[in-house]
Image: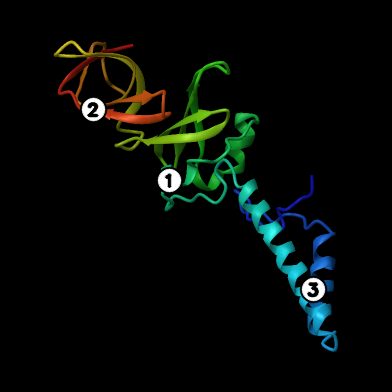
Amino acid sequence: MLAWTAFCPSGDSKPTRLYPFYLPLIADFWRRIIVERHDPRMRLVNTTLLTILLAVIGAQCLAQEGSFDGITCQTNIPKALVGRHMPNAKVADIESGYRGIHLKYLGGFGLPEDPYFLGTWLICGTEYLVLEKQSIVRDVLQSPLPFERAQSVLADCTAEKGRRWTTAVIFLPESRGQPPWSVEELWVIDEGNLKFRRVHDGRVSCGP
């Protein structure tokens, strides 16, 4: 596969090697367009070919954008992650590639044969739950509080009216004590649409 990273910023902002094919080709097109002015038809052809080449490079840049590329602490992270391809590499390698956002993997839930995988990442001091299907991000849930104040828990929750959710996401302080925990906010996964859905049902009792 050809390397397009010369034209696309990488996640860790390190300089990348330019594949030797592109610069000479682009330079040759520019030479023909600017220097060889005596042949308008060839200028049109070369302009068209250069436009196509740059469009292909741009498409490849968009296609290669995955995981946490281009994300900063000022980014709308949930919006940016949806639709991206999550990396299949060692956690230590992924984390080291994105030190600028203090990336840390906190764990995951799910198996390859399951309809989804739920991965948890710490980004810029905030916890994000990333809902994936076949490594493509379908939805992202951002913790309502900084990580040092509340952390996500997968819980079995029952409302006062008797309604029950066997796999709900709740956020609890680290010193949460023993279950059952009483919470007012929880999120469930809509497996049909692969989206997080907030449930409003008053106070709920949850356990592991």
Nearer to us in this view, 15 or 183: 183
Coloring applied to the structure: rainbow
Real-space CA distance between mark 1 and mark 3, rounded to the nearest whole angstrom:
40 Å
Residue under pointer 2: 185
Residue under pointer 3: 45
- Three-letter amino acid code at disc 1? Lys
Q: Are marks 1 and 3 in contact (CB under 8 Å)?
A: no
Nearer to us in this view, 129 or 172: 129
The answer to whether residue 121 is left or right of residue 201 is: right
Q: Is residue 184 above or below residue 80?
A: above
Picture quarter with the C terminus: top left
Q: Are marks 2 and 1 in contact (CB under 8 Å)?
A: no
Answer few, some or many: residues within 10 Å of disc 2's Cα (few below 14, many 20 plus, some between 14 and 19): some
Number of dots carrying numbers: 3
Real-space CA distance between mark 3 and mark 2, rounded to the nearest whole angstrom:
61 Å
The answer to whether residue 99 is left or right of residue 36 is: left
Residue lying at 79% horizontally and 49% vertically, measured from the top left: 2
Query: Which is more N-terminal, label 2 or label 3?
Result: 3
Residue under pointer 1: 79
Secondary structure of residue under mark 3? helix
Real-space CA distance between mark 2 and mark 1, rounded to the nearest whole angstrom:
22 Å
Secondary structure of residue under mark 2? loop
Secondary structure of residue under mark 1? helix
